[in-house]
Every structure is written in C-alpha cells, then in structure tokens.
Image (cartoon, rainbow, N blue to C red):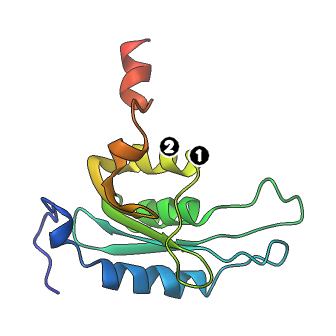
C-alpha cells in the first residue's frame, strides 16, 4: 500500500487493520515474557505512513517490565518520531487487547488527538477510551 506524505485517515474504513494486526502478531512472537507467559504485541501507523511495532519485555522484578506499547513508542522515536494515527494490540493468541491506563496515557502523548484504535469493543478514537486526558498542554496551562 502506497502511503501519502502525511497519513491522516478520516475514519476507520481508511485503516488497514488486517496489516496492522499482522505486524502486532509478528511483534508478539518476539516478546520476552518468561514469568507471566503472556506475550503481547502492538503496532501502529505513524502520520508519515510508517508502521511501527513493539512487544512486552519482562524482568525478574515483575513490576518494572515494559509493556508492548512502551516498546512501540520507543520505536516511534528511534525511527524518526511523528504521531501515531492508528493502533492495535494483540495477545499471544492474536486476540485484541485493550491497553492499560498507563499505556493509554503513553499513547495519548504520542498520538494525534483523534487517533483510531482497535479495542475489545470495536474501533474507537483514543479520546473516547481516555476521556479528559491529562497531557503536556495541561502542564503548560497550569505552570
């Protein structure tokens, strides 16, 4: 699929979620989850048309493991930055997962405000799954 210079889908029908899920599934297969055995992969389209992906990485201190969304945002910045326009996340069976609250915040700060995401209850906009989000603009306004 040839992407335009700025990839800004107007609605979910313009997102190839099958391709995005395949990238998330490929990432999930690279997860390092020896403790929970719960592999997770995430993938997203960036506003320049790139696809980025990430997987979860655990460690022996459990609580400081990295979620797949954390790895995905790291990949975003390591590959040139930009803003996420569409997102999906899958478990070890390829089932859609909903990002936790911490990861929704991470996505909020690295996505367009109307980012489209695949959720366990269908396609939604990020601002619908993280209403009244707190972000960098709030810090500036309250400084």
**22 displayed left or right of 18:** right
Secondary structure under the numbered disc 2 in the rendered image = helix
Query: Residue 37 appears in which quarter of the rendering?
Result: bottom right
**6 displayed left or right of 16:** left
Alpha carbon of mark 2 to alpha carbon of mark 1: how far?
5 Å
> In the image, residue 53 lies at what x, y percent?
46, 74
Which residue sits at x=12%, y=59%? 10
**4 displayed left or right of 119:** left
Label 2 Cα neighbours within 10 Å, binned few <14 / some 14-19 / many ≥20: some
Does residue 119 appear in this view?
yes
> Eyeballing the image, is 114 above or below 4?
above
| Residue furthest out toward the right | 60
Does residue 82 appear in this view?
no
Which residue sits at x=36%, y=15%? 141
| Residue furthest out toward the front | 121
Query: Residue 85 appears in which quarter of the rendering?
Result: bottom left
> In the image, residue 78 lies at what x, y percent?
46, 65
Which residue sits at x=40%, y=73%? 52
Label 1 Cα neighbours within 10 Å, binned few <14 / some 14-19 / many ≥20: few
Q: How many marks?
A: 2
In which quadrant is the N terminus drawn? Answer: bottom left
Identify residue for label 2. Answer: 105
| Residue furthest out toward the top | 143
- Circles 2 and 1, Cβ within 8 Å, touching? The answer is yes
Which residue sits at x=42%, y=61%? 121
Q: Which mark is residue 113?
A: none
Secondary structure under the numbered disc 1 in the rendered image = helix
Identify residue for label 1. Answer: 102
In which quadrant is the C terminus drawn? Answer: top left
> In the image, residue 33 lies at what x, y percent?
76, 76
């Amino acid at each position: 699929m040839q992407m335009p210079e700025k990839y800004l889908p107007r609605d979910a029908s313009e997102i190839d979620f099958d391709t995005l899920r395949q990238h998330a599934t490929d990432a999930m297969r690279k997860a390092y989850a020896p403790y929970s055995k719960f592999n997770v992969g995430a993938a997203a389209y960036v506003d320049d048309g790139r696809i980025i992906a990430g997987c979860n990485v655990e460690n022996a201190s459990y609580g400081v493991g990295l979620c797949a969304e954390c790895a995905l945002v790291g990949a975003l910045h390591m590959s040139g930055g930009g803003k996420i326009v569409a997102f999906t996340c899958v478990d070890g069976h390829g089932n859609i997962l909903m990002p936790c609250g911490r990861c929704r915040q991470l996505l909020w700060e690295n996505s367009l405000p109307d980012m489209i995401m695949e959720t366990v209850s269908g396609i939604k906009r990020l601002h619908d799954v993280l209403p009244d989000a707190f972000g960098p603009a709030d810090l500036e306004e309250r400084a």
